[in-house]
Amino acid sequence: MAILIIGLIIFLAGATTGIMAVIIAGIRREEREFSLTRQAPGRLSQGTRIATGLYVRARSDRSSDTYRPDVHV
């Protein structure tokens, strides 16, 4: 019984770590591509937005493919 509980705990820890890694990768991609003001660029970003509860309303005045923000750093 103890081995089953330990195995379940290890499995849940691995699943949680995997989910967090995917979410972190999606957040980094969004930051790198400055894509939070337009449609998600891929499935990873879309999944990250769903997991974090982010909703981005589509803009009707610009095409999401041609919009690139001017960033001065």
Image: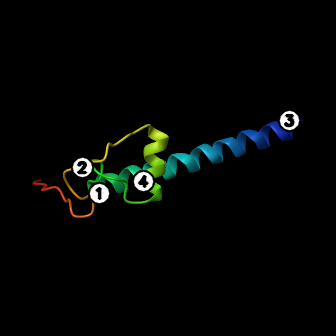
Q: CA distance from mark 1 to mark 4?
A: 12 Å
Q: Residues within 10 Å of mark 4 (few under 14, many from 20)?
A: many
The three-letter code of the residue at mark 3 reads: Ala
Q: Kindly give the residue lying farthest to the bottom in the view shown.
A: 66
Residue at image mark 2: 60
The three-letter code of the residue at mark 1 reads: Arg
Residue at image mark 3: 2
Residue at image mark 4: 45
User: Whole-percent x and y of residue 60?
Assistant: 24, 49
For label 4, the SS is: helix
Q: Residues within 10 Å of mark 2 (few under 14, many from 20)?
A: few
Horizontally, residue 24 falls left or right of residue 66, namely right
The three-letter code of the residue at mark 2 reads: Ser
Rendered residue at 57%/46% (across/down): 17
Horizontally, residue 1 falls left or right of residue 57, namely right
Q: Residues within 10 Å of mark 1 (few under 14, many from 20)?
A: few
- Which is more foreground, mark 4 or mark 3? 4
